[in-house]
Image (spheres, rainbow, N blue to C red):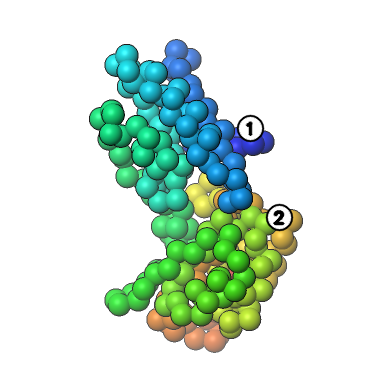
Amino acid sequence: YPISENGKALARAIVSDFIRPDQIEISMSLPFDVKRSPHPYCDIAATKIAEHLKVGTDVAVLCEGEPMLYGSFMYLFQRLSRQFPTEIVPGISSIMASAAMLGVPITYRNDVLSIIPATLDETTLSDRLAVVDAAVIIKLGRHFTKVRRVINRLGLLHRALYIERATQSNQRIVDITEVKQVDVPYWSLILIPSQMEMGRWGDGEMGRWRDGEMGRSRKIW
């Protein structure tokens, strides 16, 4: 399972109740920074995993969300799948989980959904968002201020919904205008749903409320 530089392992935490004391655990330290390549870290992890696979031991790789969508598992798959039989269990991505928690459809009919990393430079981010039908901006973290600035400049702020740590016990849904950069974690995203979805709500109905912060209702529309 992947482990961040601060020692946290979200994937392990999710299934911690099911891990037995006799099971061998292999942690994979990964940098959550686009400026640093994950390849050296994945080389080390793949070598450790291969040692167990070679002697016939099954190895389960724990993942957050969908393994084949912006997931660290993909790097291990590239290194090990040609040599060892590999079964991939589909997961629910944070994108789909967030839409469910927000209670809003993302796209309709012929809409095109764009998944955009917040790590893009501001010009590229603006160019991408300028032509979207619907979009999900992931990996916010320290890039939030830049992203919100672009969204506001493009006139999309009224459609933008912010959520962090979707489906987890510490999930938060906050009005995007109230979010402070210092509070934004890596595990957060902004959903910009289809204009058709936004068109379903009149001006007087945009104050939609949901249970967004451990029992505390927050205005998200």
Residue drawn at the location 49% of the way across and 64% of the way down: 116
Task: Give the vertical position of 182 relative to 66 (above or below).
Answer: below
Would you place residue 155 above or below residue 161 in this image?
below
Q: Amino acid at mark 1?
A: Gly
What residue type is disc 2 on? Asp
Marks 1 and 2 in Cβ contact (< 8 Å): no
Q: Which residue is pictured at 61% across the width and 50% down the height? A: 35
Give the mark nearer the N terminus: 1 vs 2: 1
Q: Which residue is mark 1?
A: 7
Q: Residue furthest bottom?
A: 203
* Front residue of this view, candidates 25 and 84: 84
The image position of residue 8, as x and y in percent, is 61, 35
Using the image, tell me which numbered label, if any, was put on residue 56. none
Q: Label 1's element?
A: loop
Q: Nearer the viewer, mark 1 or mark 2?
A: 1
Is residue 153 among the parts visible in the rendering? Answer: yes
Query: Residue, x 38% and y 23% (percent of image)?
Result: 50
Q: Label 2 belongs to which residue?
A: 183
